[in-house]
DNA sequence: CCACAAACATACCAAGTAGTATGTTTAGAA
DNA sequence: TTCTAAACATACTACTTGGTATGTTTGTGG
């Protein structure tokens, strides 16, 4: 098979798959994984059930693809990329978080963070989704941890600071903020940013 | 009606109601609100559907009762009570959190915190449950905030510290810890406690 | 232009869902 | 004891769920 032919052959199918995943992402983001039925997904995508189950063996596999093909790239773009090669970790982590909370594409306080929501809903009950989310969040942890360690090498972060612990604390703060934001609204976001700055300053 | 007669009259019924609520609490804690069906609840409680719907108009009202009669007292006992009249807020908040994360009755990292889980699941989609959870969590916020302000009056906390903001940050940290604990396990708890101590020290 | 697999479409199903209709039991007031 | 309402029990229903069985369309390699 020529690549061109393969491309055209798969093009429409890939588009259908893409449509399903991204529409499902929106629905699941707002309503949760369990609460979003396949019937709802195919109704809003105008895709038939046959097409859905051609592309995904079952709902769980669709969820897996959603995490790996929609959520993971999104987190890489908004959480990890701003920290790559950062030479001022305290500032860069703060700015990354500020952007993430205030202008990221999926910013909506009432609905939280897609990744955090899924962790809460499926981590305890679905092993493969748990693992996929674990991979995504571990990447984020690693990005923060590395930037802290780089900061230490550059003499900008105190040596007694444990990068991995700080990274954990940042992720904890992020997920907690997204969680409390669903309850108390976006005001939480500014609170977290203020206290995060105070915390980061103290690492320098 | 005499109180005694009323007491005996309601006693058995109250027990049934209590059984339903507490068993539902366990199931919902582990599996979520939506994922816990009424059929499952009545099967594990050995209570019939007629009894269930005698005590609760519908599933939502049962959830409301669960928040107000099970979750709220639990949070009052483990989150609020340790902070009442605390004269060393930095220490007391840390100890309260340590106890809450390590020895509280509903401590199970993989399942998180019942209140936090519910916030995540229903805050965006159910207004009355949202309000009930808002009330519970606001109480917790208030307890932390008050203790910080008392600490300021006693000269133990810096005057430039905003008690309400600190309280928010504590709740954010708690919920985030419970959330990340579901993903990464109980190791998160120690990390949070360490960084919390560092944070609290800096307020004195 | 034809065979054939990829990509979809339609109809269906068994299990589960919240909730109801209609009973029966039980315990205390009179 | 008897009457009555609270407290439960049973059977049922309309609807939704994830998933399947069985088609039909579509593109493309030979």
Image (cartoon, coloured by chain):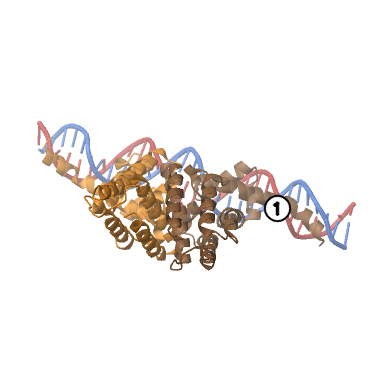
Chain colours: A brown, B orange, C red, D blue
Residue A139 on image: x %, y %: 55, 62
Q: Quadrant of residue B134?
A: top left
Q: In which quarter of the image is residue D20?
A: bottom right
Residue designated by label 1: A14
Residue A77 on image: x %, y %: 60, 54
Residue A193 on image: x %, y %: 46, 49
Q: Which residue is drawn at 63% across and 51% down?
A: A52
Q: Quadrant of the C terminus of chain B?
A: bottom left
The subunit letter for the residue under badge 1 reads: A
- Residue A155 vertical placement versus A100 (above, below): below
- Counting labels gives 1
Q: Is mark 1 on a helix, strand or loop?
A: helix
The residue nearer to you, when weighing C22 against A106, is A106
Q: In which quarter of the image is the N terminus of chain B?
A: top left
- Residue B107 vertical placement versus B142 (above, below): below
| Left or right of B17, for residue A157 | right
**Mark 1 Cα-neighbour bin, 10 Å: few <14, some 14–19, many ≥20:** some
Residue B34 appears in view: no
- Residue A27 vertical placement versus A173 (above, below): above
The residue nearer to you, when weighing A177 against B68, is A177
Residue B157 appears in view: yes
- Residue A68 vertical placement versus A179 (above, below): below
Residue C9 on image: x %, y %: 68, 44
Q: Which residue lies furthest to the front in this view?
A: A155
The residue nearer to you, when weighing B3 against A170, is A170
| Left or right of B8, for residue B51 | right
């Amino acid at each position: 098979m020529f690549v061109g032919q393969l491309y055209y052959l798969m093009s429409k199918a890939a588009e259908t798959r893409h449509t399903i995943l991204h529409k499902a992402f929106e629905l699941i983001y707002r309503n949760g994984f369990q609460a979003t039925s396949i019937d709802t997904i195919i109704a809003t995508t105008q895709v038939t059930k046959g097409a859905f189950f051609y592309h995904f063996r079952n709902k769980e596999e669709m969820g897996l693809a959603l995490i790996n093909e929609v959520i993971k790239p999104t987190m890489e773009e908004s959480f990890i990329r701003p920290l790559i090669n950062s030479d001022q970790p305290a500032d860069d982590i703060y700015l990354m978080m500020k952007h993430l909370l205030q202008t990221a594409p999926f910013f909506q306080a009432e609905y939280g963070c897609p990744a955090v929501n899924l962790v809460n809903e499926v981590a305890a009950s679905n092993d493969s989704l748990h693992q996929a989310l674990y991979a995504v969040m571990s990447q984020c942890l690693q990005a923060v941890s590395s930037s802290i360690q780089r900061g230490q090498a550059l003499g900008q972060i105190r040596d007694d600071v444990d990068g991995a612990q700080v990274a954990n604390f940042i992720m904890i703060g992020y997920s907690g903020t997204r969680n409390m934001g669903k309850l108390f609204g976006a005001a939480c976001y500014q609170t977290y940013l203020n206290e995060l700055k105070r915390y980061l300053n103290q690492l320098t």
